[in-house]
Image: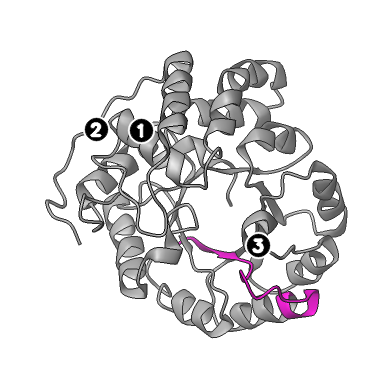
């Protein structure tokens, strides 16, 4: 169902820290124009941890409305409380959401048994397809291949976003799960290698500002045209790295504002703006990659902030 370049969408905010729907419309149109295959709305890159539940739900629904069936929308619905994750997931039943992306519970450090029961309970309480999300560097727990195998047998768990960057782990997962189980990279730096090994695509941070390039890389890789894909990817290597020089989404939001995709790079505390040193490094990368963004400026649906 999902393959190629998918974007972990940033959440644009105005100077006061409220969600800016004008910028949201702009970046959604940008992704549709550049053939991004799906938008992940209010995932961890979308700052789900600092939005209220009401804002979270409204933002996903606004993303659905703006996209108007032009691109699949995947809702971020993960939480470190199983009950909270279920409540959030159920809010999107019969809304048109294509799937939910559910991150492993953060801070709790659950056992593998706890992780299995967590995702099993969510699966039992929804009909929406579920994509697991493993990012141990941010959550403090690691969803292991044997647990992924057990979860892949549940009725509506259709895949995993594996963001450990560990390519050997990909082989383990691929060997253990059924053929149609999606294995999607969550690490831009290794995404091309991931697809070459048999992965389905990437949920990308880089794509927020380089959608056309990431789409082309993924399309070429899925057609096994790896030489051409690597030629383009080589130009983005430094960009992939600089976007994580400080905690995501600090660099990517500042970058997106600098090239005109969003009006402000506002983040909510405890996230702050990048340091002067980071800004200088970002500007250097911006100059070397020569990213050209054509702003959509079709702000016809919303003229206000939340």
Compared to residue 253, the image places residue 159 above or below, namely: below
Taking 268 as reference, is 201 left or right? right
Residue 51's disc is none
**CB-based contact (under 8 Å), mark 2 and mark 3:** no
**Which portion, as a residue range, is magenta?**
97-115
Instruction: Please name which of the two marks, 2 or 3, marks the residue nearer to the observer.
Output: 2
Whole-Å distance between the Cαs marked 1 and 3? 27 Å
Compared to residue 88, the image places residue 104 above or below, namely: above
- Whole-percent x, y for residue 302 in the image: 15, 52
Task: Give the crowd class for mark 3: few <14, some 14-19, many >=20 residues within 10 Å.
Answer: many
- Give the residue drawn at x 44%, y 44%: 250
Whole-Å distance between the Cαs marked 2 and 3? 34 Å
**CB-based contact (under 8 Å), mark 2 and mark 1:** yes
Mark nearer the N terminus (1 vs 3): 1
**CB-based contact (under 8 Å), mark 1 and mark 3:** no
- Give the residue drawn at x 59%, y 27%: 217
Mark nearer the N terminus (2 vs 1): 1
Task: Give the crowd class for mark 2: few <14, some 14-19, many >=20 residues within 10 Å.
Answer: some
- Give the residue drawn at x 40%, y 32%: 276
Q: Is residue 102 magenta?
A: yes
Q: How is the image coloured?
A: one colour
Quarter assignment of residue 60 = bottom left
Toward the front, the furthest residue is 276
- Whole-percent x, y for residue 232 in the image: 58, 18
Mark nearer the N terminus (2 vs 3): 3
Q: Which residue is mark 3?
A: 158
Q: Which residue is mark 1?
A: 33
Task: Give the crowd class for mark 1: few <14, some 14-19, many >=20 residues within 10 Å.
Answer: few
Q: Which residue is mark 2?
A: 296
Compared to residue 238, the image places residue 149 above or below, namely: below
């Amino acid at each position: 169902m999902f393959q190629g370049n998918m974007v972990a969408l940033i959440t644009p905010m105005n100077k006061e820290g409220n969600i800016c729907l004008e910028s949201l419309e702009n970046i959604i149109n940008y992704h549709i124009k550049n053939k991004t295959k799906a938008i992940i709305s209010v995932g961890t890159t979308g700052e789900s941890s600092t939005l209220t539940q009401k804002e979270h739900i409204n933002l996903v629904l606004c993303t659905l409305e703006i996209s108007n069936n032009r691109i699949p929308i995947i809702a971020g619905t993960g939480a470190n409380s199983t009950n909270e994750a279920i409540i959030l997931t159920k809010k999107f039943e019969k809304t048109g959401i294509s799937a939910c992306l559910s991150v492993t519970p953060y801070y709790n450090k659950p056992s593998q048994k706890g992780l299995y029961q967590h995702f099993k309970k969510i699966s039992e309480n929804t009909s929406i397809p579920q994509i697991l999300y493993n990012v141990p560097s941010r959550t403090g727990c690691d969803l292991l291949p044997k647990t992924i195998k057990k979860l892949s047998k549940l009725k509506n768990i259709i895949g995993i976003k594996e963001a450990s960057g560990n390519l050997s782990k990909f082989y383990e997962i691929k060997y253990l799960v059924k053929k149609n189980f999606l294995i999607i990279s969550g690490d831009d730096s290794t995404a091309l290698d991931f697809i070459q090994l048999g992965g389905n695509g990437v949920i990308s941070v880089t794509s927020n500002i380089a959608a056309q390039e990431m789409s082309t890389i993924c399309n070429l890789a899925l057609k096994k045209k790896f030489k051409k894909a690597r030629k383009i990817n080589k130009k983005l290597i430094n960009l992939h790295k600089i976007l994580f020089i400080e905690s995501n989404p600090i660099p990517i939001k500042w970058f997106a504002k600098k090239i005109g995709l969003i009006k402000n790079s506002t983040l909510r505390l405890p996230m702050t703006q990048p340091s002067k040193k980071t800004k200088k490094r970002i500007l250097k990368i911006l100059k070397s990659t020569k990213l050209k963004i054509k702003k959509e400026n079709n702000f016809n649906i919303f003229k206000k902030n939340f």
